Image (cartoon, grey):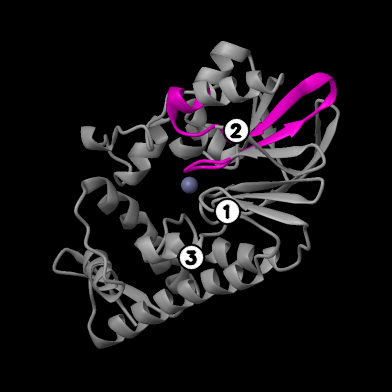
Amino acid sequence: MELQHIKDNVYYLRGVINIGVVVGEEKQAILIDSGLGDRSGRRILHALEAAGLRPVAVLNTHCHGDHSGGNAYLVEQAGVKVYAPLYDAVVLRQPVWSTLCLFAGADPINELAIPRFAMRPSPVDVIVAEGELTVAGVTIEAVALPGHTGTHTGYIVSGVFFLGDALCSEQELENAGIPYGYSVTMRLNTLQKLCNYNCDYYLLAHGDLRRDVGDLIEMNRRRVEETLAFIVDYLSRQPAEASDVMAAVCEHFGLQLRKVQGFFLLHPTIYSHLSHLHNRGEIAFKIEGNRLLWYA
Ligand SMILES: [Zn+2]
């Protein structure tokens, strides 16, 4: 991992998940996200040491283990302060909320206890709300970008927008078909909101550095609309349970679920589409034969 310069005092560590690095006064470093597990934490510390920087804070975009899994190591080894949005802070402090949410609120199966879902607990020192915050003498704008999680947040520093998982790259859309999401309603509003920004650079957490994300926003929006239209069409032909909708959506996007972890990520994602359509009055449900059937 080597520091890549973006602009002014803003850098990033390029990887499977990109970590933002903002240099503040007296060689203090502010991190945006912390990667997956202790290994990421260790690699981040090495990279900062090599650059003569001392980490003082991690600003998390959201609570997923591949973005916040390095927190615990960085807190223990470097004493960083953790900043996180409200709902995400709950999961950071008590990661069991992540796996039990995936498992329909029940005591989860052991297979879900993978680092991506069940990271080591992290303290949260500051709950981030939309607006400006100052860390190590640097002014950072926190931007609420909910949808991927309930309080997913992006950060803008010196015209560089760290987007976290608010936008999927073309590759992610290709691989995932329908990317994980807590709320389709929030996601569509967030995509609309992103159109209002005119930053110099945008960094996707899983992707590359870009000067412009207009086309990508549109591609993300179209994917959501395509999925919603497919579900409405499917449910107009027959009432179906959520699991049937999920299987039909997988077939539509050519997805083959092979791992139980993938199944339990897709499950709430399908429900987020169903609740969006239901709350807008496009589909309804009935309970019949002890099954909950959705219909259009
Ligand atoms: Zn995520």
Name the residue beneath numbered marker 2: 2
Residue at horizontal 78 percent and vertical 57 percent from the top: 200
Dot in front, 3 or 2: 2
Query: Are there few (<14), some (14-19), or many (20+) residues within 10 Å of tag 2?
Result: some
Whole-percent x and y of residue 261? Answer: 27, 46
Q: Which residues are magenta?
A: 14-41
- Residue 60's label in the rendered image is none
Residue 208 numbered tag: 1
Q: What's the distance in space between the residues labelled 3 and 1, CA to CA?
A: 11 Å
Q: Earlier in the sequence, mark 2 or mark 1?
A: 2
Q: Secondary structure at mark 2?
A: loop
Residue 80 visible, this angle: yes
Q: Residue at x 28, y 39 (%)?
A: 106
Residue at position x 50%, y 20% in the image: 42
Mark 1, ligand 1, within 8 Å: the answer is no
**Quarter-wise, where is residue 107 in the image?**
top left
**For mark 3, what is the residue?**
170
Q: Is residue 215 left or right of residue 293?
A: right
Camera sees residue 109: no
Question: At label 2, which amino acid type do we have?
Answer: Glu
